[in-house]
Amino acid sequence: MKLASYKDGSRDGQLVVVSRDLRTAHYASGIAHRLQQVLDDWDFYAPQLQDLYDALNADRARHSFDFNPVQCMAPLPRAYQWLSGAAYLNQLSVLRQLPQADLPAALKTDPLIHQGGSDAFIGPCDDIVVASEAMGIDFSAELAVITSDVKQDSSPEDALDSVRLLMLANPVSLRQLQAAEQDKGAGLVQSKPVTAFSPVAITPDELGDAWRGGRVHLALQTSWNGRKVGMCDAGPEMAFHFGQLIAHAAKTRNLRAGTVLGSGTISNSGAEKHGRMDWPKGYGCIAEKRSMEAMQNSKAKTGFMQFGDTVRIEMKGKDGNSLFGAIDQSLAPLYPAQADAVPAQESVA
């Protein structure tokens, strides 16, 4: 089943069911108006939505219309909680410019997770709006799940059963502000301004055998200004699967239905082994590319995003068709006539 939230002037949008091929959609208003409503009572609403989904795929839905990703908000436009994980140890090792063997032992046994802002997610085609290019604007190609209720101290197996929907995510980072926040020893606020999600959220069964062991065994494609920069496998190097991430977050508290949890930037190893400037499967964020350049003492230094840049993040199934639709965004200035005067502070971690 594939679900989206259409813009209707409200903060939560209008729930729509989207066909498997992402060509048509149907308002779900006869069943439920908002996705959070469905998550709060999944066992009641999901079968009804599945019936509509089946009818839509069979071309039996009477009032279907052409699906338009531009009209989409984030599938869950605002959530009770957004947790950002770091499940790919290769990315952590590259950003810290350390071999994976030298990472702190705790990072290999317990997931790194931090809380982010969840009150105003943005849609897949909405502009990324930032005050200054000097803030070090970076994209991040990730997967995310939406959970049902999760009980405190749930096992990873039980936590994995709570996964209701999966999405693609692009949590934007302002790298030049990040170091100052990290030095304070608290969470990241200013340096993590917005997160965008794919046009649709899908149930795990839509992935077929690519969904196994709490991981998605498919490649995530990332393009920057029309040039493909990443084709990273999401499955093999995910050190902590989604059940483990959810269980870690629920160790000392209950999680409510509608909790959104991200995987962290999908990253594959290879460059450090082959001595290459571009690792075989590319990268999912600019900071990773810059760190690799620093590790290899390259004279080249990739810059961060500039106003007018575009980023596209998409995952295709084994049949070559898009599963979630694409995050397809442009970077726009908050003040069109502004003069950039934000002090630079180097950071790629």
Image (cartoon, helix red, strand yellow):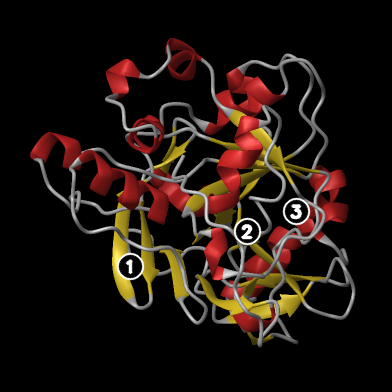
The amino acid on which the numbered mark 3 sits, given as a three-letter code, is: Pro
Please state the horizontal and vertical placement of residue 3, each as a whole percent of the image. 68, 64
- Looking at the image, which is closer to me, 94 or 208? 94
Instruction: Say what secondary structure mark 3 lies in.
Output: helix
- Looking at the image, which is closer to me, 9 or 138? 138
Please state the horizontal and vertical placement of residue 97, each as a whole percent of the image. 32, 33
Instruction: Looking at the image, tell me whether mark 3 or mark 1 is earlier in sequence order.
Output: 3
Circle count: 3
State the image quarter where residue 126 is shown. bottom right
Residue 150 appears in view: yes
Q: Which residue is mark 2?
A: 201
Position of 291 with respect to 336 (left or right) is: left
Residue 67 appears in view: no
Instruction: Looking at the image, tell me whether mark 2 or mark 1 is earlier in sequence order.
Output: 2
Q: Which residue lies at the image location 70% right of the left edge and 51% below the top edge?
A: 190
Q: Residues within 10 Å of mark 1 (few under 14, many from 20)?
A: few
Q: Which residue lies at the image location 41% right of the left edge and 50% below the top edge?
A: 287
Up-down relation of residue 285 to residue 248 (above or below): below
State the image quarter where residue 96 is shown. top left
Instruction: Say what secondary structure mark 2 lies in.
Output: strand
Q: Which residue is mark 3?
A: 47
The amino acid on which the numbered mark 2 sits, given as a three-letter code, is: Ala
Up-down relation of residue 42 to residue 227 (above or below): above
- Looking at the image, which is closer to me, 224 or 57? 224
